[in-house]
Image: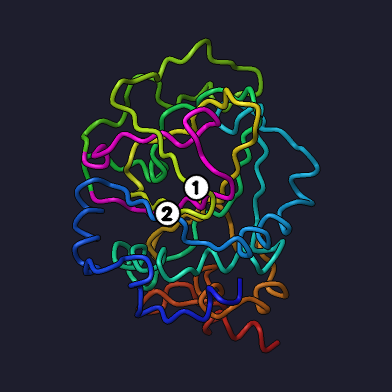
Amino acid sequence: MGAVQEIDTADLSLWLGDRPFDDWRAQFDRDGYLIFPNVLTSVDLDNVKAALAPYLGKNIKGRNEFEGRESNRVYAMLAKSSVFADLVTHPLALSFVEADLGRDCLLSACLAINLHPGETAQPWHFDDSHFQWPRPRPSLGVSTFWALTDTTDSNGATEILPGSHVWPDDHIDGAIAEEDFSKTGKREGDPGARADAMKVVMPAGSLMIAKGTLWHRGGANVSDEERLLITPQYCPGWTRTLENMSLAVPPDVAKTLPPRAQELLGYSIYPPFMGYVDGRHPKRLFDR
């Protein structure tokens, strides 16, 4: 994935075409999501999947309905391979992330989700709900979804409710509930089935970018194939991240990553001095 890193972050025409960035951003603000097909090359995909293979090979299944009892999840990804940092810092994704959250944003979470055949539909949720600020409100997060396999109508493509990022609803039918985190709780049928849901069908290598307030869920996998994606998620620099990145990615690993990845992990300062360590910039830890 070295070729991806060499692309000038100021030149997004490869993916945006002739439309100006501000036009794309207006669409993002209106719909709550954007889809860019075929962003990654076949070589990029092979490299990412090869880095993931040892962890998916353990076949550790989800612990509850939200994680998915027929799904594998891989966390703390930047501690496992620097290949994943290329996705986290991809200029196309970061251009929209930084436009919404500011250059001082942080990586809130980064995980791989592999849906096996037989997985059921996930509860509806929005990714910045943990802030518990009443809706409607501006988004406090941006989530990206990198398809490592084709996502199809039958293998569990992410389902979204277009425009729902501006809805006032903190709860909808089939939304996530406390019992969805229980090791024993199990949903019957699909209480979240909706006629207005859109399945995000994408070829492998594609990217979806979504507002943190967009209602979405993982779909049911009724096919005989697995559906694999990686979802880096971002938050403003003044908020707490979902995954504790300073523990998930130890300093001796973080210092080997690209500088922008280090900043997103928290080796950065939110003005005027939020994030210091012992009165100094956190990157000074690398000098010890």
Q: Is mark 1 on a helix, strand or loop?
A: loop
Q: Main secondary structure of the magenta part?
A: loop
In-front residue for pair 128/164: 164
Check disc 2 and give the amino acid type. Answer: Pro
Left or right, residue 282 beside residue 94: right
In-front residue for pair 226/84: 226
Left or right, residue 121 beside residue 140: right
Quadrant that contains the C terminus: bottom right
Quadrant that contains the N terminus: bottom right
Magenta segment: 138-166
- Compared with 149, 170 (above or below) is above
> Residue 136: x percent and y percent?
21, 40
Q: Which of marks 2 and 1 is nearer the N terminus?
A: 2
- Which residue is identified by label 1? 203
Left or right, residue 113 beside residue 231: right
- Which residue is identified by label 2? 37
Residue 146 painted magenta: yes
Q: Quadrant of residue 9?
A: bottom left
Q: Which residue appears farthest toward the bottom when viewing the image?
A: 287
Check disc 1 and give the amino acid type. Answer: Pro
Crowdedness near tag 1: few (<14), some (14–19) or many (≥20) residues, C-alpha within 10 Å: some
Residue 2 painted magenta: no
> Residue 256: x percent and y percent?
68, 78
Q: In which quarter of the image is residue 91?
A: bottom left
> Residue 54: x percent and y percent?
79, 51
Q: Quadrant of residue 185?
A: top right
- Compared with 227, 183 (above or below) is above
Whether residues under marks 2 and 1 lie with C-beta atoms below 8 angstroms apart, the answer is: yes
Q: What element carries label 2?
A: loop
Specify the label residue 66 is tagged with. none
- Compared with 18, 130 (above or below) is above
Crowdedness near tag 2: few (<14), some (14–19) or many (≥20) residues, C-alpha within 10 Å: some
